[in-house]
Image: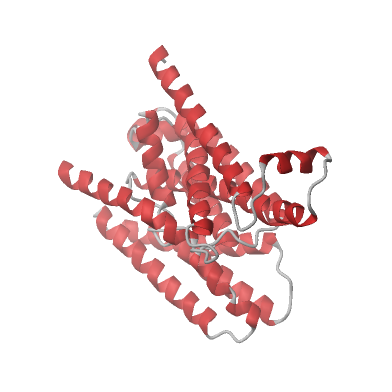
Amino acid sequence: MSRKKRNRYAAAYAALVMLLLTLLMLNVCIGSISISLSDIVQNFTGGQIGETERNILMQIRLPRALAAAILGGALGLSGYLLQTFFHNPIAGPFVLGISSGAKLVVALVMVFFLGHAVKISSAVLILAAFVGAFLSMGFVLLMSRAVNKMSMLIVSGVMIGYICSAITDFVVTFAEDADIVNLHNWSKGSFSGISWENVSVMAVVVGLASLFVFCLAKPIGAFQLGEGYAKTMGVDIGGLKVALVVLSSILAACITAFAGPVSFVGIAVPHLVKQLFATAKPLVMIPACFLGGGTFCLFCDLLARTLFAPTELSISTVTAVFGAPVVIVLLWKRQEKQ
């Protein structure tokens, strides 16, 4: 690797890390009640801080900000895996209907358990989301064998997403229990209501999945150059494809289980990161997509909370505003190349 490339990668990583930490602090400090950096430092060093500020910091803002960073990173990485699998820059968990499938199964499970006054664990939510994501991914894979054009595959995925979302909205709308009706906010996408238990579970699941993805960096790099080339390099194509499907489904399922469906992050972040680093190498892109996804979701969540306070926007509303133009540019560039 040339010195110029190393310097670019180092500068880009430093920028992403600094931006991530800055947004993390802003998400913790800014709100209806402002919390200063000195209050945060005092809270963790045993100093005096108001009880109200302490509760807001430790029970609401800090777990929410950490969740946005972790789940945003998972979504960015999931989008990168799907784009690699389908060899298409506009493939993503939201566009292909994978997030909507996960949302449907999670909503059904939550309605069933809440209707019987049973508390749901984080593990059950992730498992339900994974089942829904995997089923939707299965339909997409079946259609990919029957449809030659990638554009038709994307349209089919969007239709699956609409069907799953319609069923979910129907179930949530006609639910009677007040707690179940509150699922409407979750079904639109939100990082609110995250607990420390949720953060610990998602950190373990996303961390392990991301580690497995990083271990596959070399086979993924060979796969990007074509299946024929990957076979000559000794890559097990079938096993790699299964790993890409399973890992992308787990990552997408994790964010859907806790925050609902979040749109366009999985498409926009890998493309923006690729432009920033000027490379598609998995060893560079995998950690960069994670950092980029966390940064993007922290920025959007900050706007969702504060832009029209005290009214809070759904996270998908904000991510769509910034992510959709990226998709339009991708489609435009793709059309020019044809």
Q: Position of residue 191 (x, y in %)?
A: 58, 58
Q: Is residue 2 visible?
A: no
Name the residue at 58% across, 68% down. 106
Q: 173 or 207, which is in the foreground? A: 173
Res 197 quadrant in image? bottom right
Q: Is residue 39 left or right of residue 86?
A: right
In this rendering, would 149 be left or right of 221? left
Q: Residue at x 57, y 84 (%)?
A: 175
What residue is at 38 percent from the left and 39 percent from the top? 272
Indicate the position of residue 116 as horizontal and vertical percent values: 71, 81
Q: Quadrant of the C terminus?
A: top left
Please give left or right for residue 254 compared with residue 143 in the image: right
Q: Quadrant of the N terminus?
A: top left
Looking at the rendered structure, the number of numbered marks drawn on it comes to 0
**Eyeballing the image, is 50 above or below 10?**
below
Instruction: State whether residue 89 appears in this view.
Output: yes
Q: Is residue 211 above or below residue 267?
A: above
Residue 53: x %, y % from top left: 73, 53
Give percent across and percent down for residue 48.
82, 45
Q: In the shown orientation, is residue 186 left or right of residue 328?
A: right
| Colour setting | secondary structure
Seen at 34% across and 61% down, the residue is: 143
